[in-house]
Amino acid sequence: METVAVIGAGVSGFTTAMVLIEKYPHIKRLVIVGREIINDPAHTSLQHEFTSWAGGANHMSFAADDDYKQQRVDIVTYKKFMSLGRNVKNSGIRIMKNKLIMFKTTNTPWYIKQHACEGISSISDAELQYRGLNPDIYKGFEYLTCTITPYIYLAFLRNELERTGKVTVRKCLKTFYSFDDAEDFLGFKPDLIVNCTGLGARSILSKYPCEKSEIEKIIPYKGQICVINKDLPFQVTVEDLPSDDYLCEYVRNINGAYQFSHVFPRSDGYAIVGGISCPGIYDNVKQKEVSIKLIENITRFVPELVEDGPIEITFDYVALRPGRKGGVRLDFKKYNNYNVIHNYGIGGAGFQASIGLALEVSELVKTKILNKESRL
């Protein structure tokens, strides 16, 4: 295996490319293809599918208590991010505490119960009261984690990849409707294609009848966040809002949508305030009412943000989390003469699972491609 194409230039694509180059030094050429690429001019009609650039991410696992595979993926990524945050200044990763608050009736997250993260402690009743939350109803934990500033981290990954001399990043506004289209654009047939296209997987799989049911599983989860010119030495995440008074009308009117409240201070001095998740909604329309409610809620929960004056929104932003019914697709499949590994559909956990999933891709390369080559 000497030539590889990674289709998709978000965090999944860049991280997968990095791991493959590190694990398989015999790769001579790796091309990353994307419609939206960090540090390149944006194509605005597609930009809301490229969730990576404008927001903020923290490492807070969404894995269920019995989803041990996803837990392992998240732990691997957590450890790598913490190492980068401590040792690489230009990575865009900032280590800090997350104050996680939820109903007492909510199951304590597995990573707290298993001590899979650092610096775990309970939040006092006095602090819950300070944040306007009843300690008879709420519980809270602090633990050490990190905020990832996506546009800095992705630029860091791109720079590291291009420094290898083996990796090329190419922008393509053309939609691929098959892996033949990808080959036509590349000008060569790669030994391996890694499909990290997120929501774009609906297009690239569209000419394969065997993928009809799969395409129906791929769904967007619309999100909206505010970027504010405020800083904090910690994150706050309120998972369970106290009442419907904290919900915006927009979320109430969408089946399956939910709202939460969090603030992630980034490494550039700004902070992200969120958020909402609306399944099956594809548009990129910003709802003023949503932004107002997000700021109103976070002001209640984090009064520190208004100690030096009211919050002003620098900008707000809508983007789509690339979801998939059943969770991430991570498997190998052959399409005519193309070797393809899929890595898409992780939804809102793209950053926090990125390194672990990329390592899973590298294992599929070993078992599904290199072992077959060795038997020829």
Image (cartoon, helix red, strand yellow):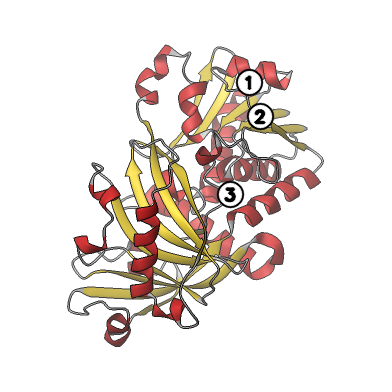
**Where's the C terminus, which quadrant?**
top right
Q: Say which residue appears at 27% left-offset and 84% top-offset.
A: 125
| Left or right of 300 on screen, residue 194 | right
Which mark is in front, 1 or 2? 1
Residue located beneath label 3 in the image:
53
Which numbered marker is on residue 5?
Answer: 2
Amino acid beneath label 1 = Ala
Q: Residues within 10 Å of mark 1 (few under 14, many from 20)?
A: many
Quadrant for residue 114, please give it: bottom left
Mark 1 and mark 2 lie on one chain; the one further toward the N terminus is: 2
Amino acid beneath label 3 = Trp
Amino acid beneath label 2 = Ala
Which numbered marker is on residue 182?
Answer: 1
The reply to whether callout 1 and callout 2 are in contact (CB within 8 Å) is yes
Q: Residues within 10 Å of mark 3 (few under 14, many from 20)?
A: many
Q: Element under label 1? A: helix
Q: Say which residue appears at 65% left-offset and 56% top-offset.
A: 152
